[in-house]
Image (spheres, rainbow, N blue to C red):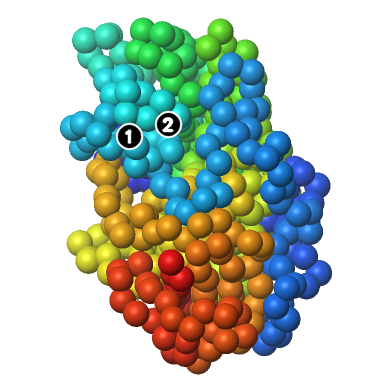
Amino acid sequence: MLTNQRHISTKHSYSLLTTLLILVLTSGCSLFGDNTPTTPASTPIPKGTPISINVPVCHLSACTNFAPVTGVRPFNDTWQNVHTFLTFDYNVTSPATVAKNYDFVWGADPNHIYGYRLGNPNIMLSYYMAMNVDGGTFTDTDLGRKRRGIAEWKVMHPDWVLYKCDRTTPAYEYSTSSVPFDLTNPAVFDWQMQTYIQYASSSYYGKYDALAVDNVNMENMFGACGHYDANGQWVQLFSGDNVDPKWEQAVVNWLTKVQAALHALPNPLLLFANFSIGAAHLNNPFTQQALAHVDGVLDESGFTHYGEYRLSDDQWLQMVQYVQNIQQQNKPFFLINEFKSGSTITNDDREWVTASYLMCNQHLAQVYIANIQGYGSTYSYPEYNIQIGNPKGDMYQVQNVYWRDFTNGEVVVNPTSNPMSINTASITSATSFTDPYGQHVGQTFTLSAHSAKILMTH
């Protein structure tokens, strides 16, 4: 939830399967290849048959260091080892020191830009704002851009406030009091340009690379319905239902307008969205259009479904292929993986996430691990520093689990609900391995349900 103006909110009400089943995206390619099994445990696939999208992910050097807009910093190539990003940085005290550990910062503090650039000239930095509420990075009262309450907005711009269908309750997001706006109103867009976007692009704070937009929801999660016009007359915009084509169209229109504006700035910016499909139709044209008008996707559900459980069977496979498909469009994918608040994130937890990430990384994926909403701080995990090398190809299925060969080892994931006996003899000539924690792993072992192993040979 948006506990402060620079916080990503969780979306536990979503159906994960709905979120992941994007069958065709804007590239025109199919998400699932013809050789994709119904369940990981039912149809073994011979080694050498990759499980990936129909249109192969580009592995050529020309496809890396991709910059979609002239004047914008190129994306880092994440092909080698593990690449991480930082979700907010409000607890960072020395950006120059930690910058080398990250390729990207979602919601970078403007006061940290110089330090990040000093510590890592290639780091990509984004400025944070929410899609249609009064909230974002630049809310400093000394600059005259403070976040205002409902009473102030009713006086200043009563026709901007978005209400539920009872025509009384503002369509607040989650449990916050940040005032929701009518994102179809051109005046709201102009205000967002002046209050946030133009400042993010200005050299006053230093050069940002992207706009990080929170809560881009394709479902009408909060029952948004309409607003009052300047004469106090009710204007119906949406049905208030979760699945609402008019809401979906409004989101697409807003993204299209914002992306065009960002790309046209004197110091152009990219558009990265915390994007959720939720209860919206699986493969409707609005979803495709929305993804066509973002330059990168951040996903909070990850392989742990917002910290609720590890993905199983087809859910895991669909997430892998979703991440691959976004990268196929030359767009980075920022993968957040949360664990229950207050719990200790174990080696087994992190190995599950890291191995799953390594299965779907195709040059443009980055990973982040934390407790639920444990954002703003840096974390140093041994899995982040493994020297696994680069993939030799796409993942495949053998022994009813998934494998991917790397130059310095193997990655194996068991997303099923059953333990699996593993023998690496059919996979590699190596007879002994080391895990990310320096422990010996033999040629045979049992891989428990919903778990993974990273096997290092060097």
Q: Residue at x 31, y 60 (%)?
A: 382
Q: Is residue 295 left or right of residue 210?
A: right
Q: Residue at x 38, y 14 (%)?
A: 206
Q: Residue at x 76, y 54 (%)?
A: 56
Report if residue 260 is visible in the image.
yes
Q: Quadrant of residue 17?
A: bottom right
Q: Is residue 224 left or right of residue 280?
A: left
Q: Residue at x 43, y 66 (%)?
A: 458
Q: Which residue is mark 2?
A: 123
Q: Nearer the viewer, residue 435 or 249?
A: 435
Report if residue 155 is visible in the image.
no
Locate residue 188, reporting x and y percent. Answer: 50, 18
Q: Nearer the viewer, residue 359 or 265?
A: 359
Q: Amino acid at mark 2?
A: Ile
Sequence-wise first label, 1 or 2: 1
Q: Which residue is mark 1?
A: 99
Q: Say what secondary structure mark 2 lies in.
A: loop
Q: Is residue 167 left or right of residue 54?
A: left
Q: Amino acid at mark 1?
A: Ala
Locate residue 197, reporting x and y percent. Answer: 47, 17
